[in-house]
Image (spheres, grey):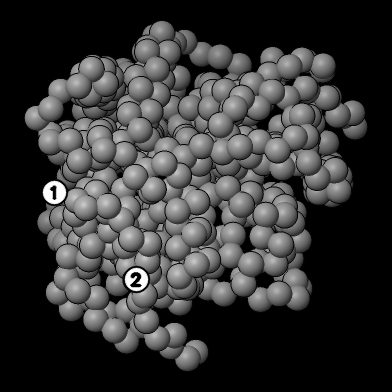
Amino acid sequence: MQTVPLRPVRGPRGLPCLGNLPAFGKDPLAFMARMRDEYGDAVTWSLGPRRSLFLSHPQHIAEFLGSREHAYGLLEVGWAFQRIVGESVVRSTGADWRRKRGLVQPAVRPRQVRHFGRTMVDSALDAAGGWRDGERLDVQREMTLITQRVVLRTLFGNDLGDRTRALVEAMAVAEHMISTELHGLRLFLPDWVRTPSRRRLLDAVATVDAEVHRLIGARRNRPGGDDSGDGGSGPSKRRADVRTAAAGGGDLLDRLLEAADEDGRPLSAKEVRDEAVTLWAAGHETTSTALTWIWYLLSRSPRARARLDDELDRVLGGRSPAVDDYERLVWTRQIVKEALRIYPPAWVIPAVAREGAVLGGRAVPAGTTVWCSQWTVHRDPRWFPDPTAFRPERWDADAPDAIPDHAWFPFGGGPRGCIGARFAQVEAALLLATLAQRFHLDVTPREVPHKVGLFIQPAVPLIATLRARPQG
């Protein structure tokens, strides 16, 4: 493949000191799309005092993501983000990053994700069991409840009983605070400033930390390996074997506690806390957001939904899906992939160039913040004709339009790509299959605006009417 030279051009002029921060903060997606459309594939701009370079060509993005670990440093994206994820793998660099990734990644590799397939399906069945034909529900709220159930069961082995509500509310406060800091002047507030919202965040983090450390202590102190951290929740109709999730045993917390590096060193309690909370925060909202948009897109595409119905009836034959069905549910997976293209939950990846960073054969000045955006590349008509149209057939094996490498990267890429990408894709497909086998969620077919925070989410509630599907 011929290298695409990097030829940066100067982008929109900004204000003294603030640079392009006001325009970015007002609507970051529109601002980045404008840079791509009006200036080109490599645009220099400024975010406050930071010199920045925005990339839009997949080849430059592939090179950037592939060299991010050795040629780039992390861009700290806010005080709130640091408080919730601590010093987890997403904020580590160098030898510390390599050690932590080596310890955490085995817990979410494909063969380990298989152990959690039944938990995913059972969590969806628990929710659908309470749904009624003709009922109206808030789609995002319902998808969040389901994915929270999945992540709590796979991470901690149970629903944590009476503590679940307080923990879910605390995590929601933390995620909201991270979102509000990502664009705006609050991103530049010194760490020592304690605004009312920052105090609320500290209270929320304290609630989460107390429970996670309680669970860690209970696991490490249980006699004979028995779980003493069940929160008194008791069994339910589908919870008896949630801890083991499948033969092969153990939830993600157990696996983090059992992990040891080549020198035999385990993760400390603080490191286990940081990785567990990061998996929790990233693990539920990515999937719940994707599913929310999927129901919206299917409501606006009767043809795609009919093809989904046909696949579920043909492949499953009336039984509930299992993880072994994942590869056979081709159209289901293509729906997930296309929804992640149109509405990627994460929307930007920044990193700070070190000395020696090179893109497209050109040196990138040290200290430059390099950015790329899933939103702008996924909606680039050069790679995706009619880019806002929902067309899962784009991903057919015999589709006529070749899609370049890294024109689709909802989970990033390179060595620092999301370690939970496989988990998220399997979860989204199995939850979609389980729920769509039983119900259509009819969302009013009108244009729904989006809002930008930590993830790209609907700006208004999506209210759906449940329509029960006949069961064979």
Q: In front of the other: label 2 or label 1?
A: 2
Say whether residue 142 is left or right of residue 162: right
Disc number for residue 58: none
**Which residue was labeled with disc 2?**
10
Residues 40 and 457: in front is: 40
Secondary element type, mark 2: strand
Q: Residue 54's x, y, as percent?
A: 37, 65
**Which residue was labeled with disc 1?**
265
Image quadrant in which you'd find residue 203? top left
Above/below status of 18 relative to 465: below
Q: Residue 232's x, y, as percent?
A: 39, 9
Residues 17 and 119: in front is: 17
Instruction: Name which residue lies at 22% across and 66% down.
Output: 368
Above/below status of 52 relative to 424: below
Q: Amino acid at mark 1?
A: Arg
Instruction: Name which residue lies at 71% across and 74% down.
Output: 401
Above/below status of 91 relative to 436: below
Q: Amino acid at mark 2?
A: Arg
Image quadrant in which you'd find residue 320? top right
Q: CA distance from mark 2 to mark 1?
A: 49 Å
Determine crowd level at label 1: few under 14, some 14-19, many 20+ residues with C-alpha closer than 10 A. Answer: few
Q: Earlier in the sequence, mark 2 or mark 1?
A: 2
Instruction: Name which residue lies at 61% across and 52% down.
Output: 342
| Extreme-left residue of the structure | 192
Q: Residue 453's x, y, as percent?
A: 42, 38
- How many numbered marks does the figure carry? 2
- Residue 338 visible in the shown view: yes
Determine crowd level at label 2: few under 14, some 14-19, many 20+ residues with C-alpha closer than 10 A. Answer: few
Q: Residue 106's x, y, as percent?
A: 36, 52
